[in-house]
Amino acid sequence: TDFDFIFHDLFNGHSSIYKKIIHLLAAGMKNLDEIKKSIHDTQSNESSEDSLEEIVTNLVIAGFVTRHYTWSIKTEKASDNYLYRLSDNYIRFYVKYIESNRAKISTDDYNIP
């Protein structure tokens, strides 16, 4: 349960939007538009005081997410369209393996074949 407490404390009680972004990025790199579309498709009436760009920036500052620059081959310059990647390996492991099996783990029913 440390994951839930850490996110709640770090992000001032707005952890649900941060967790949604973490889950999206655990599946692979995405740009801000892809994140916005996915969040708006899954988000009910939950509103956030911060803009989505600010939320993603907070995840970058916290070290959970890395911003990767994209390049334009034609102009040979960096683009303003960044790709975001989940960079914290423990969180990736938690989201992919622990979270989905948390009930089994807590009851000691999880067996590795």
Image (cartoon, grey):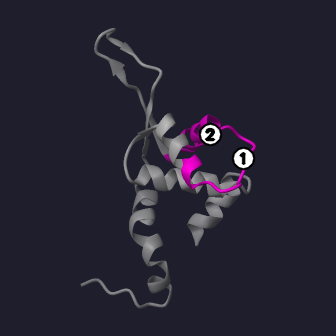
Secondary structure, mark 1, is loop
Work out which quarter of the rendered image holds the C terminus and state it: bottom left
- Between 9 and 23, the one nearer to me in the picture: 23
Left or right? Give the position of 77 relative to 2.
left
Q: Which residue is mark 1?
A: 48
| Residue 17 seen in the current view | yes
Which mark, by number, is residue 1?
none
Work out which quarter of the rendered image holds the N terminus and state it: bottom right
Image: 30 above or below 21: above
Q: Image quarter for residue 96? A: bottom left
| Residue 88 seen in the current view | no
Location of residue 26 in the rendering, given as x and y in whole percent from the top left corner: 41, 54
Q: Residue at x 62, y 61 (%)?
A: 6
Q: Which residue is mark 2?
A: 52
Q: What residue span does the magenta drawing correspond to?
A: 39-64
Verify whether residue 56 appears in magenta: yes
Q: Image quarter for residue 44? A: bottom right
Image: 69 above or below 23: above
- Three-letter residue code for mark 2: Leu
Outermost left residue: 113
